[in-house]
Image (cartoon, rainbow, N blue to C red):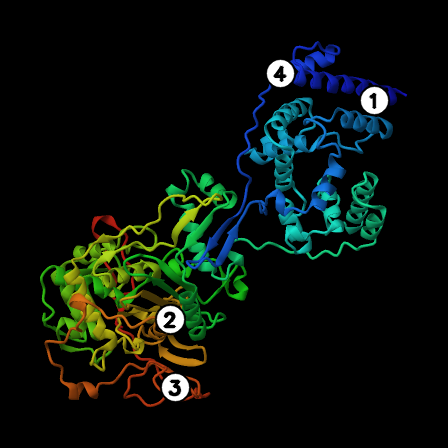
Amino acid sequence: MGDISGRVVRLVGSCALAGGLFAAAALPAVGGTGWLAKAAADSYIVLPSELDTPPLAQGSRLVAADGSPIATFFAEDRQEVPLADIPLVTRQALIDIEDARFYDHHGLDVRGTVRALATDLGVGSTRQGGSTLTQQYVKNVLVETADTKEAQAEARAPTLSRKLRELRYALTLDRKLSKDEILARYLNIAYFGDGAYGIAAAARHYFGIGVQQLNLAQSAMLAGLVEGPALNDPLQHPDRALARRNVVLDRMAGLGDITPAQAQAAVATPLALQPTTTPQGCEASSVPFFCDFVKTSLLNDPQFGATPEERTSRLYRGGLTVTTTLVPSVQAAAQDAVDSAVPRDSSFAAAVDVVGPGTGAVQAMAVNRNYGDDSAANQTKVNLATGGGGGFQAGSTFKVFVLAAALQQGLPLSTTIDAPQRYTSAKFSDFQGGRQTAYTVSNAGDSEAGRFDLVQATWESVNTYYVQLEERTGLDGPAALAEAFGVRRADGKPLARVPSFTLGTNEVSPLAMAGAYAGLAAHGSFCPPRGVSAITDRAGQPVGSFDPACKQVLDPDIADRVTSVLRGVVDGPDPGRTGRAAQLDRPAAGKTGTTEGYGAAWFTGFTPDLAAAVWIGDPTGGNAHPLRNVTINGAYYQQVYGGDLPARIWRQTVSGALADAPVAEFTGGAAVMATPFVQPDTSAQATRPRRPTSTSPAGAPTGATGNPPSAPPAVAPTPAPPAAPVPAPAEPVAPPAAGGAPPAPASGGGSG
């Protein structure tokens, strides 16, 4: 009896409240309807009336340079659509079940509120909602704009103050907006369960169709979800969803908006769900590592937002279109090149970055790994193309900076030095076991000894020549030049100024090396590698500026002379040149790199159109897992040099990328390939032992393994024991860098 009495009191008070609030809203000067109404009206009047309605949270899209999709990021799966795209039957289903008098009231339906309270009184629980669609829209906006969990809880709390605030906003909105505008906003903000926000996302998620294709039965099911999205979730509770759908159909028929026959036919229709998950994030991208690079760049870019939280919100909720620099055809060529050379199930990894000279545009970024967290399945989310966090020693690809610094300091290409197989520096020191010792370096093979000029020493990547050249240039000049070309240690610190600098003992990223060589291709103009070319907001307006930030860091004449030397590494007449396996049907320049102990192998090169860097190694550690006595993709290697697999991957990448492009010639001082000033003894050179490379599967074309033209054809591997490995050169240990910078890793760089 007491419970019934309490409900009667609530009914009377609520009726008075509803009437009083309506009177306060419509005629503020009218007297109250009792002390409850007066108190409520007084509280109501002091509440703010203007509702802040920022744009709805909407996902952002990453697209390639040609506009094709790459990835989507969203906090709420929503696609905002105009009311005209939503079928009339869908709109009517929602109105009939949620607010049948929507087009008749002014934001507060007194009749509906009283009816809902009477129902509550009869059954002792809420069975029929009293809020209008306008009030529900207001509640959704308040929840959507709440920036903390506490604020969201307050926006949902069943309190009088919340109801008063919603009502105040609803009545104001009803005066400012048309009914159709309010309905469109509600249909786009409402939550339909299972991560689907808005009617368009719900149509796609539950039925796999566009919103315009919704029929009566589907519309009724979706309309029935907003009351209790979790309770009536058709994927988890299909029976409840079906029953709720049929309630909606009965309501529509009872109001005369559909005929009994239409209702009957729809009731007889099964739910016929076609669950569709909207993929998002780099895990769902076809180019996940490039996606990861762009996402990371945006989330660390101050012009994208003042704080990390602001940048994250903008990406996941801002409805942006991010146009990237990725060229799908170039990406396809790079990915095919790494996958065909080093399979994804190999313990060894390969990464390729392609950068446009003069723009810094990253056109491709490929890794021979699936993107994911399952390390047992050889998946990784560590982006090896950007250095994998710690970076990799770059080997003799760093010799280009010593070459450029030498020319910058006035040393001629004819600079001739006796380069023995093993050289102990009288200028540089080493530190081993805590004591200072002489710095000693070796070449990669006995063939690399003799008298060389700068051209031929580069073509054959002679370590002992380049350490002596580095004695003349000093350590800071080459390192400063490399940094000007955007190369820093992968941990962000300056490059270590150590004697083994020229041998590439600094740990850097393939992307940085591709960017630096692109600067040489652009006649010494360095443009930092970038993955974004433009961003527009949901209205199509530009956001920020992403133009290339290029800077001339090396005199064009000197840069072109460096290029003229590097052309010979690939296309020169010297049979001992290290980059012959990278040769194309068009002019190219480049440099091989093999780290001491064969921990990694590189080829970095360029044409006038693009630059690319290729790295191969074991991502778990090159020193512990060197590229020696290994079988990769069915081919056995005594050791992998930069002129082997990396050069072939580079060639395949660039050939594919430029397959439809006209042949571009180098210009300026790079138009003519440099020639040696010291003529080698060609008869002796022809008898030099060549570096062993690989034994390939039967049927591989001659030369496909990177063997020199004079080598015998490749043969299929047999169960016989592999050939004995060639002894590795001594490993120089780098002394501490000046100024207390960390020393370079203990292993020195290897030749080509």
Secondary structure beneath label 3:
loop
Q: Which residue is mark 3?
A: 701
* Label annotation for residue 653: 2
Q: Which residue is mark 1?
A: 7
Residue 231 at x, y = what percent?
Answer: 75, 43
* Label annotation for residue 45: 4
Residue 122 at x, y = what percent?
Answer: 86, 28
Task: Choose the circle earlier in sequence order: 1 or 3.
Answer: 1
- Mark whose residue sits in front, 3 or 4: 4
Most extreme residue toward the right, as rendered?
Answer: 1
Q: The residue under label 3 is which amino acid type?
A: Pro
Which residue lies at the image location 19% right of the left edge and 76% below the top edge? 421
Q: How far apart in space, not on screen, are marks 1 and 4 (Cα)?
A: 27 Å
- Mark whose residue sits in front, 3 or 2: 2
Q: The residue under label 1 is which amino acid type?
A: Arg
697 up-or-down from 199: above or below: below
Q: Are marks 2 and 1 in contact (CB under 8 Å)?
A: no
Task: Choose the circle earlier in sequence order: 1 or 4.
Answer: 1
Secondary structure beneath label 2:
helix
Residue 729 at x, y = what percent?
Answer: 26, 73
| Picture quarter with the C terminus | bottom left
